[in-house]
Image: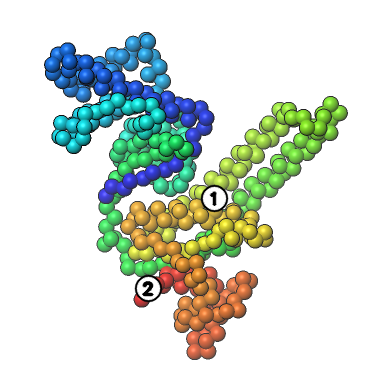
Amino acid sequence: MIKAIKVRLYPTKIQEELMFKSASIARFSYNWGLNYLNSYCKENNKTLSIGELRKEFTKLRNDSEYSWLKEVSSEIPQQALKDLGESFKNFFNKQSSYPRFKKKGKCEISFFHLNNKFIVEGNKVKLEKIGYVKMKDEGRLPIGNYKKDKIKVLNPRVKFNGKFWCLSLALEVKDATKEELTNVSIGVDLGIKDLAIVSNIDKPFKNINKSKEVKRLNKKLKRLQRKVSRKYDMLKGESCFKKGEKLTKTQNIIKLEKQIKLVHKRIADIRLNYIHQTTNTIVKTKPCRVVVEDLNVKGLMKNKHLSNAVAEQCFNKFITILEYKCKWNGIEFVKADRFFPSSKMCSCCGTIKKDLRLKDRTYICSNPKCNLVIDRDKNASINLANYKLA
Ligand SMILES: [Zn+2]
């Protein structure tokens, strides 16, 4: 099965310059090739193969006058010439008109990237001669060294749409055979006490932010932040400092801020890693369907008692990653309606308990014929698992 994927990139200034250069060299090469072929045809009354054309281009690239062509990956112009070959093929097959020159400002700003030269780590993708570029939507691209791990991608292109950069490619995914899945529908209830309670897994997935290691790092972070703010206060208190003036950071402040950044990164890595572990475990139970709540994260964040705890859990990231992993395994992924009473409904008889409070950790069914007593979150996860199942 082939899947088309597009991820937004967040290059640094220097990376962006290189990306614009790559795109302009792709355009230059295409136009150079077209011009070369046109004059070759006129002079010799016959055409030249794209293979020959590419050899001519290599000569040009080795010419000292064109040394700037070497600032980007050699694959970029080579692919641009292949693209030109495709344009001619389409012309000869009467599928399109004669190839035209690509005009600056009128053609797409894009360039090709070699198929297997990707390395994906967390939310970064390594592009040849450009380096690690941050991307949105981690979990979309498989993590790994594409050459070593033999991850196959087709036609990867880096594009600029006038505002954003993105990487688009087609990914070969193993055929998700439905036979391998069980016929179980599962529900995933997300929370703050525990990260996730899953209907078919007994143990809850704990809140990683309550672990010793994260607590220790958070303490360290606070200590460093206090230290750095004291240093700033001291700077401002110095007699030579005038109000409104820009502070010159001392070596000490620079060092402390570097440390703070590292601790932040360490915490973020632990959280992300945990999300990957959790979602992997859920997907490995091979359900045919996964149902999650449609969480109103923005709304939850408005509650100042909860906002910190909610932010720490990275619910949106969890849902995004779980969704991609489900899709890759052929598992149906469903977000329950925001008004679905997953917590208030009894998972056994369907009675709605209107007076359920947030602090009630146990669900006790009020229907005298049922009398179900169950963990509140487990109850919600079972309700989600049964969501819209007739
Ligand atoms: Zn009941």
Label 1 SS: helix
- Residue annotated with mark 2: 389
One can see residue 38 in this view: yes
In which quarter of the view is residue 155 placed?
A: top left
Checking the image for residue 271, the label placed there is 1
Q: Residue at x 42, y 37 (%)?
A: 161
Q: Residue at x 62, y 74 (%)?
A: 357
* Amino acid type, mark 1: Arg
Nearest to the observer: residue 243 or residue 284: 243
One can see residue 203 in this view: no
* Relative horizontal placement of residue 65, taking residue 272 as reference (left or right): left
Nearest to the observer: residue 32 or residue 195: 32
* Amino acid type, mark 2: Leu
Q: Nearer the viewer, mark 1 or mark 2?
A: 2
Quarter of the image containing the C terminus? bottom left
State the image coordinates of residue 24 (x, y, percent, origin top left). 39, 25
Q: Residue at the top extreme?
A: 64
Circles 1 and 2: CB atoms closer than 8 Å: no
In which quarter of the view is residue 307 placed?
A: bottom right
Checking the image for residue 67, the label placed there is none
Q: Residue at x 82, y 29 (%)?
A: 242
Look at the picture and state if 352 lies above or below 176.
Answer: below
State the image coordinates of residue 19 (x, y, percent, origin top left). 43, 29
* Relative horizontal placement of residue 215, taking residue 3 as reference (left or right): right
Q: Is mark 1 within 8 Å of ligand 1?
A: no
The mark that comes first in sequence, 1 or 2, is 1
Nearest to the observer: residue 129 or residue 4: 4
Marks 1 and 2 sit apart, C-alpha to C-alpha, by 33 Å
Look at the picture and state if 103 lies above or below 169.
Answer: above
In which quarter of the view is residue 45 placed?
A: top left
